[in-house]
Image (tube, rainbow, N blue to C red):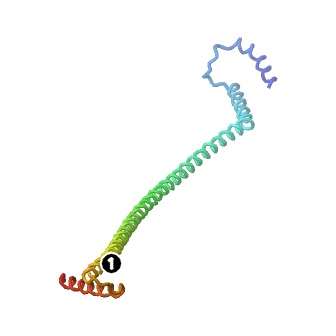
């Protein structure tokens, strides 16, 4: 290459003497030949040393871009799938919540009914017990009144008769009399 430049320099002063103003667009075979040779050498050097790394870098970049696009597409599809799963889970959770609420309302209604039924049963039991106690008290009161009536009747009869009979016999007679009086009173009411 250096020898080529030296040869050009030697011919340059001689050419400068004979030449007019250079015309860039004028076709000369010597300059065109060397231009083509230099272009082909440069093309060979670029093809051998520059183009493979440049094309490799471009291919790698293209591959990275394609991988990024594929990853973005996969991510978008995954996001859509997860979103759909979340929507389904939300719908299922809402359905379960409605089910739980309905069950809770049923349970609350059942507990309310059971509580009312227990309260009603307790009320009936209290009323029945109160009626029994009233009946028992009434029976005791009647029995007490009967005893007092018997004692008063015996005392009155003793005073009238002025003679004291056997106490056991006196009671039996008066009790029989009062029973007959009660039966007669009960028959009169009916």
Residue 161 as seen in the image, left or right of residue 132? left
Most distant residue in the right direction: 3
Tell me residue 188's x, y (percent).
Answer: 18, 83
In the image, residue 152 above or below residue 11: below
Q: In the structure shown, which secondary structural element does the residue marked by tag 1 occupy?
A: helix
Question: Residue 135 appears at what percent x and percent y?
Answer: 33, 75
Along the line of sight, the residue nearer the viewer: 105 or 165:
165
Front position in the image: 126 or 138: 138
> Which quarter of the rendering shows the C terminus?
bottom left
Q: Quadrant of residue 152?
A: bottom left
- Looking at the picture, tell me which residue is in the foreground, 127 or 14: 127
Residue at point 69%, 13% (across, down): 18
Q: Pick whichever, 131 or 51, lies toward us.
A: 131
Residue assigned mark 1 = 147
Residue at 78% from the left image edge and 21% from the top image edge: 5
Q: Residue at x 32, y 84 (%)?
A: 164
Task: Indicate the quadrant containing the N terminus: top left, top right, bottom left or bottom right.
Answer: top right
Q: Residue at x 81, y 23 (%)?
A: 2
Residue 111: give x, y in percent of width and height.
41, 64
Q: Quadrant of residue 65?
A: top right
Residue 86 at what x, y percent from top left?
50, 54
**Above/below status of 38 relative to 80:** above
């Amino acid at each position: 290459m250096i020898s080529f430049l030296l040869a050009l320099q030697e011919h340059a002063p001689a050419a400068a003497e004979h030449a007019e103003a250079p015309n860039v667009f004028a076709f000369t075979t010597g300059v065109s030949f060397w231009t083509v040779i230099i272009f082909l050498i440069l093309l060979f050097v670029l093809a051998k040393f520059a183009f493979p790394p440049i094309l490799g870098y471009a291919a790698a970049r293209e591959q990275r871009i394609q991988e990024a696009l594929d990853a973005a597409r996969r991510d978008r599809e995954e996001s859509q799938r997860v979103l759909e799963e979340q929507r389904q889970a939300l719908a299922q959770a809402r359905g379960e919540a409605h089910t739980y609420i309905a069950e809770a309302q049923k349970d609350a209604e059942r507990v309310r009914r059971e509580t009312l039924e227990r309260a009603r049963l307790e009320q009936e039991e209290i009323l029945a017990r109160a009626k029994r106690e009233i009946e028992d008290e009434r029976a005791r009161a009647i029995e007490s009144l009967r005893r007092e009536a018997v004692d008063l009747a015996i005392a009155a009869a003793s005073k009238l008769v002025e003679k004291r009979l056997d106490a056991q016999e006196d009671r039996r007679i008066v009790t029989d009399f009062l029973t007959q009086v009660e039966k007669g009173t009960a028959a009169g009411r009916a």
